[in-house]
Image: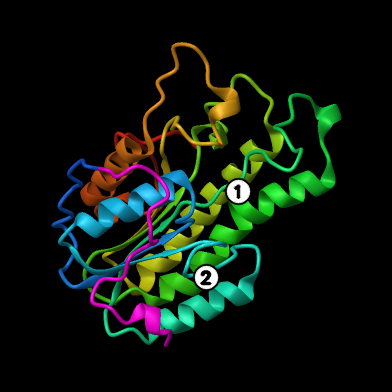
Amino acid sequence: MSAEWAGPKSPCQDPPRGPADSGRPPDLKSFPAGGLALVIGASGAIGEALCRSLEKSPAFERVLGFSRSGPHRVDVTVEDTIAAMANQLARLPVPLRLVIDATGFLHGDGIMPEKRLAQLDPQHLARAFAINAIGPALLMKHLLPLFPSEGKAVFATLSAKVGSIGDNRLGGWYGYRASKAALNQFVRTAAVELKRGRRQAICVALHPGTVDTPLSAPFAKTGLEVRSAGDAAHALLAVVEGLHPDHSGGFYDYRGEALPW
């Protein structure tokens, strides 16, 4: 086991990259005390804010954040790194109770969301699916079996409202929409399997809303409600706190309201 995992409550990142979050996070009293909380994508704005909020919560004995560039490294497009992470987590003396997957890809490296069919590119589509759907599915493959057989445990992955097929009235953003829709189906299907052996465990997709991050910056519109990463993290954790087994397999926004598939 890595020495940097050995502390009673390991930091997600040191030092923090963003401004300190002074808000009070949800108490998360619905979780059994003494567990482990895990954030994947901890180097992003939302992931880092989630880490900081969880570290303030008394609900978990340890909080660990993983990313491609942080002190604890994992790349969701490389299964071997996910398997290695899971193997180390399995050897920790605290049970895994919460996993939040805050990874995602919308634009970058010259890639922007497609507005028309003529802009579809196979390589760009493959990247969107690798990060937005296949990666989270592999996290479920390796991490859901680590959940305890009894007591509340939650796997929550950040999806997007534009991944809703029923809500799609504007078109465009083909790769992002389709990959997030695929993610939602992975969540729904994994929840069915999870319930067979861990009836109190929960697997959900969450929509964080429009958050002030580099991902959303190019698409901000006048009058659009944009919240800070800290506010988004608190809202998401409040939703997580309110989840119970009947919610497993669902798709919810940052207010806890169900979204159409």
Please tell me in which quadrant of the rendered image residue 39 appears.
bottom left
**Magenta-colored span:** 1-21
Residue 143 location (% of width, % of height): 45, 71
- Residue 156 shows in this picture: yes
Relative to residue 124, is residue 217 drawn left or right?
left
Mark 1 lies on a secondary structure that is helix
Q: Earlier in the sequence, mark 2 or mark 1?
A: 2
The crowd level at tag 2 (other Cα within 10 Å; few <14, some 14-19, many 20+) is: some
Give the spatial CA distance, label 2 vs label 1.
Answer: 15 Å
Q: Is residue 4 magenta?
A: yes
Kindly identify the residue that appears in the image at 24 percent across and 71 percent down: 35
Hey, what amino acid is under mark 2? Answer: Lys
Relative to residue 254, is residue 47 drawn left or right?
right
Q: Which residue is mark 1?
A: 182
Q: Is residue 230 magenta?
A: no
The crowd level at tag 1 (other Cα within 10 Å; few <14, some 14-19, many 20+) is: many
Closer to the camera, 26 or 69?
69
Residue 215 location (% of width, % of height): 56, 37
Relative to residue 11, is residue 106 drawn left or right?
right
Hey, what amino acid is under mark 1? Answer: Ala
Please tell me in which quadrant of the rendered image residue 110 appears.
top right
Q: Is residue 189 above or below residue 163?
A: below
Residue 93 location (% of width, % of height): 28, 85
Dominant SS in magenta:
loop
Q: Which residue is mark 2?
A: 141
